[in-house]
Image (tube, rainbow, N blue to C red):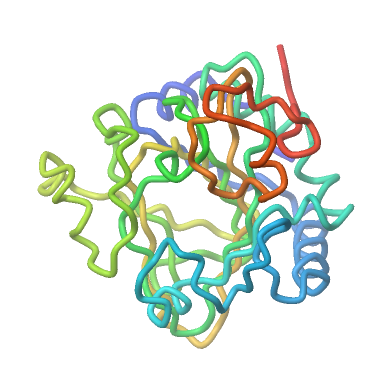
Amino acid sequence: MNSELSADQINFYQENGYVVINDFLNADELEIWREAVTEAIIDRNGLKMPGKGIKIDENDGINKDADYFNNVFDQLLNLWQTNDKVKNIMLDKHLGKMAAELSGADGIRIWHDQALIKKPWANPTSWHLDTPFWSFSDRRALSIWVALDDAVLENGSLFFIPGSHKQTSFDNPGIGKNMNAIFDFYPQFKNTKSVAAPMKAGSCSFHNGLTIHGANANMTPGFRRAMTCAYMPDGNVFNGEPNILPDAYLQTIKAGDLLNNDSQNPLIYHK
């Protein structure tokens, strides 16, 4: 794993809200990730996330047009909780250290992992933010996005609005069908040039949860698979948004409570 970050990479991330790391995994490591994720998806048998009872082809209540959004990507969350191979990958302290160095946080907890699979001919992923969906509010929150297949312009590569993380807020503009909907909330970026981030399999990106980002449609008959993980800086508190927290856990916490349950959000790195 190419987990050593240069000062230039850290500075680029902090200025632009994202960074691409080529050849993050070597060929053997990439195969380990692919096998683990494939096994975990099969084991899950369509269940989107533990503790919620939602299937990947069902409306999760976030999006009104289920038919459209079910053909954006298949999304399976917290595979680390149901598969030991994925758990071994996700709890690697090297990942946490990278997230800490980029974000400036002293400690890093897993918020959730997720496999994101664009099937053949899948719809685009509209411009959106991540952090406003989550159950905590921290401008340092971020995600890693690991390409398990080549992610190119033709099959759904990521795009970013550089520097947008400095001006966006925790208000949630949602994810619409129209790519330009985000600019109703952030008109200052309407004429900003977006940056494509194609990645060959085994490369990765990190992006801030307040960076505006999206992905192309899959214009090919093949799959575009990615494994991602969202990270929460240690010390955050519950903001009242349920998000991926299991229903049983939600019964035990209230707004303002510290999110430090290691069985739900394990601490994977601390200085």
Q: Is residue 170 above or below residue 69?
A: above
Q: Is residue 260 left or right of residue 242?
A: right
Instruction: Name the residue furthest front.
Output: 251
The residue drawn where x is 58% and y is 65% is 75
Q: Is residue 211 above or below residue 63?
A: above
Expressed as whole percent of the image width and height from the top left, the position of residue 132 reads: 40, 41
Q: Quadrant of residue 229?
A: top right
| Residue 3 visible in the displayed image | no
Expressed as whole percent of the image width and height from the top left, the position of residue 119 reads: 54, 79
Q: Is residue 62 above or below residue 265?
A: below
Seen from the viewer's position, the closer of residues 147 and 164 is 164
Q: Quadrant of the N terminus?
A: top right
Seen from the viewer's position, the closer of residues 92 and 151 is 92
The residue drawn where x is 53% and y is 17% is 104
The residue drawn where x is 39% and y is 62% is 215
The residue drawn where x is 11% and y is 39% is 188
